[in-house]
Image (cartoon, grey):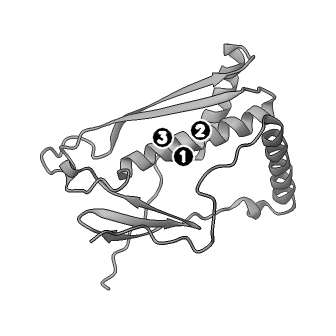
């Protein structure tokens, strides 16, 4: 039996529309101004709650819904999966890389440090021995994460380092990975 991710409740594009640098700058500026005004009027308007729901399917796969979007998380065959989608740790790295792109674009606009193109590679090391019950002395998660940012544009390396510092200080997913976050888990019998 084949399982597919549930259809989104509201239609959304499956491809990202092409945006010019001028359009991107205008949208980033407008969003920044609107959020600044909203936060100035009501500080609590910046308090956001994210939510994802998931259900197990197949051997170890999971269908996930986050907002209007649905996707499949799975493992490769070596970990009993069907390789129907990226693994959970692949999604973590994808979330980090995606968040870096967003925050680089946001702070490039805010700080006046433009670039033409951005490419991000996020890579991490994980020792699966803990996951598989073979070695309790190792961490079950990543032991190191490496991020490679490539920016093309007219700015100097020094200016791009200023931009990097701002992104490192303000990227939500980088913060989640670098710093402990309290997690409350409950199990309910269904």
| Disc 3 residue crowd, few under 14, some 14–19, many 20+, Cα 10 Å | few
Helix, strand or loop under label 2: helix
Observer able to see residue 170: no
Residue 1 vertical placement versus 33 (above, below): below
- Residue 53 lies left or right of residue 40; in this view the side is left
Q: In the image, what residue occupies the spot 24% across and 39% down?
A: 127
Name the side, left or right, on which 35 lies relative to 59: right
Q: Residue at x 59, y 38 (%)?
A: 100
For the image, the number of numbered tags is 3
Q: Is residue 96 above or below residue 112?
A: below
Badge 1 density bin: few <14, some 14–19, many ≥20, Cα 10 Å: some
Sequence-first disc among 3 and 1: 1
Image position, residue 47 (x, y; %): 68, 61
Please give the label number shown on residue 173. 1
| Corner quadrant of residue 50 | bottom right
Please provide percent x and percent y for residue 166.
Answer: 68, 32
Q: Which residue is mark 3?
A: 178
């Amino acid at each position: 039996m084949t399982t597919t991710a549930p259809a989104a409740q509201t239609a959304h594009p499956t491809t990202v529309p092409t945006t010019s640098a001028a359009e991107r700058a205008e949208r980033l500026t407008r969003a920044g101004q609107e959020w600044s005004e909203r936060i100035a009027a009501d500080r609590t308007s910046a308090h956001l709650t994210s939510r994802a729901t998931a259900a197990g399917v197949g051997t170890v796969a999971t269908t996930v819904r986050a907002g209007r979007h649905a996707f499949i998380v799975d493992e490769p065959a070596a970990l009993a999966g069907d390789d129907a989608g990226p693994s959970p740790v692949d999604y973590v790295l994808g979330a980090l890389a995606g968040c870096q792109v967003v925050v680089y674009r946001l702070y490039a606009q805010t700080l006046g440090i433009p670039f033409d193109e951005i490419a991000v590679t996020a890579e991490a090391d994980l020792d699966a021995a803990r996951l598989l019950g073979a070695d309790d002395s190792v961490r079950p998660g990543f032991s190191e994460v490496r991020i490679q940012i490539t920016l093309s544009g007219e700015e100097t390396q020094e200016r791009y380092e200023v931009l990097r510092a701002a992104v490192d200080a303000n990227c939500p997913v980088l913060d989640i990975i670098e710093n402990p976050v309290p997690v409350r888990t409950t199990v309910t019998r269904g």
